[in-house]
């Protein structure tokens, strides 16, 4: 395995890339189904069934990307896993309880007596909201270098709100893609109302992370990096503009362009994520622990990597299969 | 209470809540595949009725299992950072393989299994059902490999206080793995058998005489009757394996303080850990020696051998292990009596010819099945408490002490989250059990079960009620 150079260098890098990929896929996929949950109170009870139907076959697999991401952190960078999660003890607990509530409410609302359905709808909303807020809070605290003070908490609360609005935005774009008529028109309005959260969130994070760390500032604002990186903000800006204009035209005749907002928000999330990854590399615990210092033994990483090479393509293939099988507008869900 | 004991209770609470649901789904996945294949082969609609009822229970249980499982992957880091720092090189790949070979498989194909029947060809739906069952079993395999390794670590070396893998074959097939895995899989089968029999008996008592409920009642009772003797045998072998590798645990299970021959099998006692003796002993003479060494004067290890010269106790807390073990055994014996009695009653000849079948079960037996619908949970939890508390004070036997792995988190924070988890878990267990009985009542009344969403799925239903081809 010396083929690619020193395994203590390329293995941690590979695993950091894999972890990044999992987090990105998670944020996009669970982002839209969490967003659908956050939008629940704005919908009529009848519409809620259709919203649930649009995410029903996917949410479980979507959440599995979180397990994979946290699993890679756990197995490839064990000391970082401990350092990050003990620092985020409380938001993690809030997120876990949120995930529990929404996951089970999903099932209970369809099976419990009808009189309880509203209560489970409430649990689904509350769980989705808790999860989104907690994830945004963790993101903010991570950007602040996991420092615990009132100022960093303040920033984390801001990112919590922005990420939640961002999730509801991508959730709304998913609904535009998956629903029709009245609900689709509502979803367009929700997306128009939610795009500001994304813009403010991106702005706040872009402004704050270089200010917190001189190292990140130098990575972005020194020549010639500044020029190479210019496409990031430019592309993001163009995407936001395109999304905004696209939303004005929806819903269109023959459902034309209903996929565009969702595709646009995936692109925007991806750009934002790449920017963050660039800022923090090579650190896994900001300014404290690099991926190279935190990595597990090469012989353990190799055995995971070999399996990953076989299994990850299969996972991607059958995930794609599920999205193909359940393509098109969401219909009523029933157990057959 | 300090952070250590609170963190232990918290992890114990989470893992106890979690295991309830995989214990059902591991076996229920295969049972659903069986129902589906029976329907394809016989064309008998009762098997599709059975499938359609139990797939709902499966979906609900699966969701409970998924969300409670996510909790644990985080708590390794939030509460037990020392675990991964010390043995991460071994635990890591095992957990990674669980996520990659099991979690995604079951999660993706569950969607197709639950909602895809009208969208995919029948063979693909059957394949999805198989892959979900296979995925849950793979998940059980990997997690039991890791758990067994924590009891009987092998195939590694310590360098500077960190474990490094030397032989993956030895790690995976560590000495206690085969016994523990088989014991757990059968436990899942039994949990599922008694749940199926219990809910079916409940429907029967509510006047449900459908072919579907006859089939599942007979199926559940028979599955229980077949599995329980196998489980007793496997459990005995597992115990002997533990005697070889973790004698202090067996000593605690038997409540035996002094190493020696002719040790009795204690049916009841109150272990007094301060005085280091038992009170109110009721035992069968030479029983423990006979079971563990297969002769009356066999030497059985005692707890006093596991106290160091400076007084440090290296054996588990005795009474918790001692009582848990007896709860598990007691539940197993009750399962044996009930399922064998039921099968004997069902096999009785009818005066007009043929067997009596489900009609031959008197009301008290049916109520006993209802009462024991969740007996598998009790036995499984008691068994896990026996083996996991029995591993203390070690987290990884002989390698890492539990107290050395705990996170430095303020105790009030752990207590606060613990209380929240407990409240949520209690509410969810209550909701889960009551919804299961609610579904059973609805089915018994012949009402259509609540579907996920708006009505209008009739076409798919009719299509599915046709036999295979």
Image (tube, coloured by chain):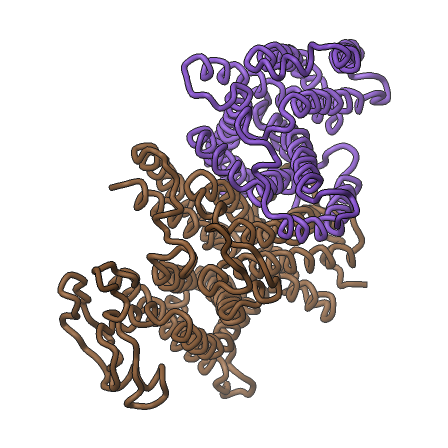
In this rendering, the count of numbered labels is: 0
* Colour chosen for chain A: purple
In the picture, the quarter occupied by the C terminus of chain B is bottom right
Query: Is A53 above or below relative to B402?
Result: above
- In the picture, measured across the screen, residue B309 lies left or right of residue B335, that is left
When asked about the image quadrant of residue A200, the answer is top right
- Residue A228 x %, y %: 79, 15
When asked about the image quadrant of residue B382, the answer is bottom left
The residue depicted at 47 percent of the width and 44 percent of the height is B76
- Residue B438 x %, y %: 46, 49
The residue depicted at 52 percent of the width and 61 percent of the height is B144
* Colour chosen for chain B: brown
**Observer-nearest residue: A141 or B107?**
A141
**Observer-nearest residue: A78 or A259?**
A78
**Observer-nearest residue: B167 or A335?**
B167
The residue depicted at 68 percent of the width and 50 percent of the height is A302
In the picture, the quarter occupied by the N terminus of chain B is top left
The residue depicted at 46 percent of the width and 21 percent of the height is A147
- In the picture, measured across the screen, residue B388 lies left or right of residue A77, that is left
- Residue B201 x %, y %: 45, 65
Query: Is B203 above or below relative to B228?
Result: above
The answer to whether residue A38 of the structure is visible from this angle is: yes
The answer to whether residue A182 of the structure is visible from this angle is: no
- Residue B340 x %, y %: 44, 79
């Amino acid at each position: 395995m010396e083929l690619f150079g020193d395994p203590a260098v390329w293995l941690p890098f590979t695993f950091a890339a894999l972890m990044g990929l999992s987090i990105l896929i998670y944020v996009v996929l669970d982002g839209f189904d969490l967003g659908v949950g956050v939008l629940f109170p704005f919908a009529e009870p009848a519409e809620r069934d259709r919203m649930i139907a649009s995410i029903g076959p996917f949410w479980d697999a979507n959440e599995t990307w979180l397990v994979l991401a946290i699993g890679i952190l756990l197995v490839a960078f064990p000391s970082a896993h401990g350092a990050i999660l003990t620092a985020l003890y409380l938001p993690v607990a809030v997120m876990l309880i949120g995930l529990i509530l929404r996951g089970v409410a999903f099932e209970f609302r369809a099976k419990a007596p009808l009189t309880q359905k509203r209560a489970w709808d409430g649990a689904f909303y509350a769980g989705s909201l808790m999860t989104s807020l907690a994830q945004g809070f963790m993101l903010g605290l991570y950007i602040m270098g996991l420092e615990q003070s009132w100022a960093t908490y303040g920033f984390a609360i801001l990112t919590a709100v922005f990420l939640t609005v961002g999730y509801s935005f991508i959730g709304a774009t998913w609904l535009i893609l998956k629903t029709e008529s009245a609900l689709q028109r509502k979803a367009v309005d929700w997306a128009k109302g939610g795009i500001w959260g994304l813009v403010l969130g991106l702005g706040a994070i872009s402004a704050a992370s270089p200010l917190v760390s001189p190292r990140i500032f130098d990575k972005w604002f020194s020549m010639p990096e500044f020029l190479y990186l210019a496409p990031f903000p430019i592309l993001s800006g163009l995407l936001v503009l395109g999304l905004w204009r696209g939303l004005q035209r929806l819903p269109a005749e023959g459902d034309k362009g209903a996929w565009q907002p969702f595709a646009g928000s995936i692109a925007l999330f991806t750009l934002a994520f790449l920017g963050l990854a660039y800022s923090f590399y090579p650190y896994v615990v900001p300014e404290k622990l690099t991926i190279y210092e935190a990595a597990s033994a090469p012989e353990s990483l190799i055995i995971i990597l070999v399996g990953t090479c076989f299994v990850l393509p299969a996972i991607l293939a059958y995930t794609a299969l599920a999205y193909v099988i359940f393509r098109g507008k969401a219909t009523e869900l029933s157990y057959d | 209470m300090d952070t250590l004991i609170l963190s232990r209770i918290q992890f114990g609470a989470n893992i106890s809540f979690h295991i309830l649901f995989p214990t059902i789904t591991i076996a229920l996945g295969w049972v659903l595949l069986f129902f589906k294949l029976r329907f394809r082969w016989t064309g008998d609609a009762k098997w599709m009725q059975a499938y359609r009822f139990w797939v709902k229970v499966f979906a609900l249980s699966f969701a409970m299992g998924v969300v409670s499982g996510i909790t644990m992957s985080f708590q390794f880091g939030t509460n037990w950072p020392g675990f991964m720092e010390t043995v991460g090189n071994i635990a890591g790949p095992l957990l990674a393989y669980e996520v990659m070979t099991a979690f995604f498989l079951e999660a993706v194909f569950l969607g197709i299994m639950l909602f895809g029947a009208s969208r995919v060809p029948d063979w693909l739906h059957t394949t999805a059902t198989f892959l979900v069952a296979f995925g849950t079993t793979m998940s059980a395999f990997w997690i039991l490999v890791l758990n067994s390794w924590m009891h009987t670590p092998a195939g590694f070396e310590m360098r500077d206080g960190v474990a490094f893998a030397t032989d993956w074959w030895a790690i995976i097939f560590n000495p206690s793995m085969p016994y523990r895995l088989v014991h757990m899989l059968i436990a899942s089968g039994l949990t599922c058998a008694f749940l199926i029999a219990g809910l079916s008996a409940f429907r029967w008592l509510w006047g449900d005489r459908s072919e579907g409920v006859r089939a599942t009642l007979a199926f559940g009772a028979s599955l229980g009757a077949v599995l329980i003797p196998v489980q007793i045998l496997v459990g005995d072998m597992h115990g002997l394996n533990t005697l070889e590798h973790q004698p202090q645990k067996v000593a605690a299970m038997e409540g035996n303080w002094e190493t020696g021959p002719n040790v009795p099998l204690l049916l009841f006692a109150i272990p007094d850990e301060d005085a280091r003796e038992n009170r109110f002993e009721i035992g069968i003479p030479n029983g423990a020696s006979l079971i563990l060494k297969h002769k009356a004067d066999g030497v059985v290890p005692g707890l006093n051998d596991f106290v160091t010269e400076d007084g440090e106790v290296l054996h588990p807390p005795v009474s918790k292990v001692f009582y848990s073990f007896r709860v598990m055994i007691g539940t197993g014996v009750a399962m044996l009596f009930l399922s064998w009695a039921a099968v004997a009653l069902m096999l009785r000849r009818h005066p007009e010819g043929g067997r009596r079948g489900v009609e031959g079960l008197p009301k008290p037996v049916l109520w006993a099945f209802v009462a024991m619908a969740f007996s598998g949970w009790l036995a499984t939890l008691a068994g896990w408490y026996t083996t996991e508390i029995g591993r203390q004070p070690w987290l990884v036997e002989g390698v890492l002490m539990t107290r050395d792995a705990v996170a430095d988190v303020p105790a009030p924070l752990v207590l606060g989250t613990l209380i929240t988890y407990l409240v949520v878990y209690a509410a969810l267990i209550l909701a889960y059990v009551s919804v299961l009985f609610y579904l059973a009542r609805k089915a018994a009344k012949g009402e259509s079960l609540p579907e996920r969403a708006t009505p209008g799925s009739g076409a798919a239903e009719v299509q599915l009620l046709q036999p295979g081809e």
